[in-house]
Amino acid sequence: MTEKLQRTAIAPKNPLLNASRAGNLPHVPGIRIGDYIFLSGMVPVDPATGERSHGPIAEQVRITLANMRHMLESAGSSLERVVRVHVVLADISHMAEMDRVYREFFPTDPPARTAWSMQLRFGNGCEIECVALAG
Amino acid sequence: MSARREIIAAPAGAPDPSQRGSPPASPAVRACDFIFVSGLTAVDLQTGERVSGTTASETRVILGNLKQLLEAAGSSLDRVVKVNVLIHSMLEAPNMNEVYARFFPDPPPARTVCGARLPVGVKVIIECTALA
Amino acid sequence: MREIIAAPFPGLDLRQHYGHHQSPAVRAGGLIFCSGMLPVDPHTGERHHGTLTSEAHVVLGNLKLLLESAGSSLDRLVQVHALIYDSIEYDVLNRVYRQYVAHGPPARTVWTAQIEAGFKIALDAIAAA
């Protein structure tokens, strides 16, 4: 019988990016299991203050993806090891702007992605989650 | 040595992310046991043009393309483990399901369907995870 | 190879009851991929519309039954997409949800989405086998 995989929670080195802990929420920033890391959805949070950062959508996407990079690197992975991304936008018309910034973070051989729009909480313009190969 | 991921390129003729105007997403990525497929919309693989239709007809185009993509990657529709379907309206779910049932042989993969706001003119987006 | 996990109770066979072309869950690569779980009675398949609270209890109870029948458990959840019909119910969702994942919750993203049959909540989950 094959051994059961063990899951471990991951956390960002920057505690201000630990939304689970900060909000006493019933989730963890991410779970490592076998070859993969599954991240919780991330929203635009200023890494210097832990406060929501609600500027133009380009800025929100940039901050969110930079935070995602930090999260992955804290867990020994990286943006280059991302296999799938889900991008949710509050406003579907922001897709082109989001793409423009997104390309900065995934310039070549980008991961698989699905992008769409839904109602988001707290005025967030985007929420981004991903699955990556563990380090 | 840490595991590697491999980009699955689009079948010949299909849009690729390095092309101007294409979304920055690889059609699929193989990593360890799985192939992670991007959310697909209905496009003509020869021309790369969006194909607008009903939810049912777009589902048919998407799943036909998915079949080609998976087979080109050495997998197949019967190796899909999980599908996520985003529809512009849940009223269309039965129409999507009827077409969907013709593509996935028994027993079908796990699936989640929900309604969401999709790009203008897009009726349905389908993403999936398959065994490599 | 992938292994289809059958519904542990007849009500969780949504294909039989509602014609949804899906299996309840699939095991592959050490993970269990679950179909979106709905607030249906696990024995009869009857829809249990209610408040977000009541529907969440049904969904999480069903997920527990499904995972345990497959040799897993809620403690082995890896990632959840919690679909709710309106983000205003976020706190209500959390109040119920945390009761079920008290021992080490998984990663989670909350999606505000249109769910079938006007349900207020559905859960999409991946667990360790």
Image (tube, coloured by chain):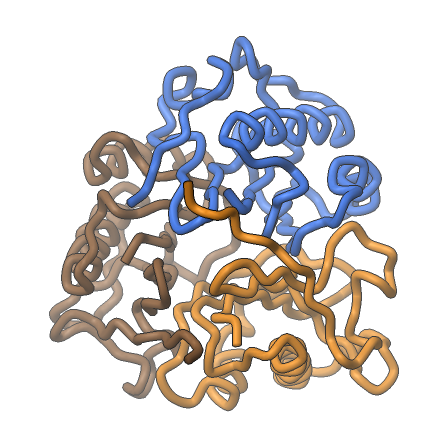
Chain colours: A orange, B brown, C blue
Q: Position of residue A74 (x, y in %)?
A: 67, 79
* C11 left or right of C120 in image: left
Q: Point out residue A78 in the picture as x, y percentages from the top left corner.
A: 54, 81
Rendering coords of residue A81 (x, y %): 46, 77
Residue B57, compared with residue B48, is above or below; it is above
Please give the name of the residue rendered at 32% of the width and 59% of the height, measured from the top-left corner: B41
Q: Position of residue C7 (x, y in %)?
A: 45, 22
Residue nearer the viewer, A6 or C107: A6
Q: Quadrant of residue B9?
A: bottom left
In the image, residue B83 sits, relative to residue C58, either above or below, namely below
Query: Farthest residue in the front direction?
Result: A1
**Foreground of the two, B90 or B63:** B63
Count the marks: 0
Residue C64 shown left or right of residue B18 in the figure:
right
Quadrant where the image shows the N terminus of chain B: bottom left
Q: Quadrant of residue A27?
A: bottom right
Q: Quadrant where the C terminus of chain B lies?
A: bottom left
Query: Position of C70 compared to A23: left or right?
Result: left
Q: Is residue B7 above or below residue C66?
A: below
Residue C11 seen anywhere in this rendered image of the structure: yes
Q: Residue at x 50, y 42 (%)?
A: C129
> A15 or C35: which is nearer to us?
A15
Residue C118 visible? The answer is no
Residue at 50% across / 90% down in the picture?
Answer: A104
Q: Is residue A26 above or below residue B113?
A: below
Extreme-top residue of the structure:
C44
- Residue at figure coordinates x 70%, y 44% from the top left: C86
